[in-house]
Amino acid sequence: MSSSEDTGTLLDTLPHNNVNLQERIDHLTEELDALRPKTLEEVEELRIRFLSRKGAVAELFEAFKQLAPEEKRALGSVVNRVKQLATERITQFRHDLEEVREVAHEDLTRTADALPMGSRHPLSLVEEEVLAIFTKLGFSIARGPEIEDDYHLFSALNFPPDHPARDMQDTFFIQQSPDILLRTHTSSVQIRVMEQSQPPIRVICPGRVYRNEAISARAHCFFHQAEALYVDKGVSFRDLRELLLFFAREFFGPDTQIRLRPSYFPFTEPSAEMDISCNICHGAGCALCKQTGWVEILGCGMVDPNVLRNCGIDPEVYSGYALGMGIERMANLKYRCNDLRRFSENDIRFLAQFEGAH
């Protein structure tokens, strides 16, 4: 038996002088049965209309108080049932609409099972660690375009016109006259920084570079570099050496030793290659260090006065040092990976090994 039928049956037993109250109860019951609110706001309006202190149910109870005692005994349960009906209907409306709203905000395209977590790429981890060491020393991070012009990539860096790096077999040219090409190093960013600012300058320039090389375990047509530059009054080669020793021990461990070997770069004079004591055999000799106990990791030197002059900086007043390293090379040494190609093959089996790396 429905609530309305039950209520109506009980009301039929009441005396005739309660017909007005019976009609009000019947009307109220029918109205509750016909309610179909579509929003939570409408449900709240119904609650106020029926269940508030001045609502329809409260008015019904006020009328109930005017009845004689014997009439109250017959009608009391009916009035209470109307209040119960109103409370249950409004509560159910609110519950149903809240469920609909929750479902509407759910992503129904999401898989039922949790997807496996990914991991940071080892090159990203190494680059981030290198940058953290240099920023700790007061270096700012500077970035520049990967598509460069000949001036910023070669001429401003003191490369002679016949330098092999300018040849098409070593560099990816996009157009000629004027020469536009994919940068072969991030030193071009250092030039742009020196053109736009005055010393003191202390920057670290990370980024992707490109060279026309055959892809092998030890070389690739694209890779990543991080190059540092410091220009100020009184900067010396000793400052460079102390920086290199600090960096090596921060990155590879406190027992790391370094050595500098004379070398040549067009944009630095004097120039050097830096080796570190092999972090695998610790100087005893192994395949990685070719039984020498040393591993080359970067090139460095004092900024050539011509480079400073090309950027509008007086080399009689200022001096500076520069250094550059390959991120893949650093990752090879840190994670003892013997094949450069693995970093760019996107092999999940390889990359999954770095889930716990930081």
Image (cartoon, rainbow, N blue to C red):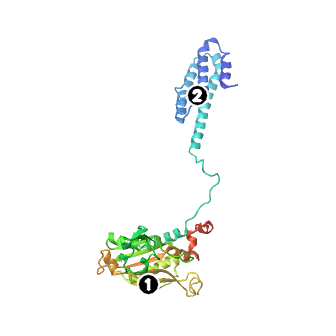
Residue 240 locus on image (x, y percent): 41, 81
Residue 129 locus on image (x, y percent): 50, 71
What's the residue type where badge 1 is placed?
Answer: Ala
Q: Which residue is drawn at the image coordinates 61% and 69% (left, top)? A: 350
Image-quadrant location for residue 352: bottom right
Q: Residues within 10 Å of mark 1 (few under 14, many from 20)?
A: many
Q: Is residue 336 above or below residue 71?
A: below
Residue 47 locus on image (x, y percent): 55, 31
Closer mark to the observer between disc 1 and disc 2:
1
Q: Is residue 123 above or below residue 267?
A: above
Q: Residue furthest top?
A: 16
Q: Give the residue number, with chain letter if any, for mark 2.
A: 35
Q: Is residue 202 visible?
A: no
Q: Give the residue number, with chain letter if any, for mark 1.
A: 272
What's the residue type where badge 2 is placed?
Answer: Leu
Q: Which sits in the foreground, 248 or 19?
A: 248
Q: Name the side, left or right, on which 17 lies relative to 237.
A: right
Image-quadrant location for residue 1: top right
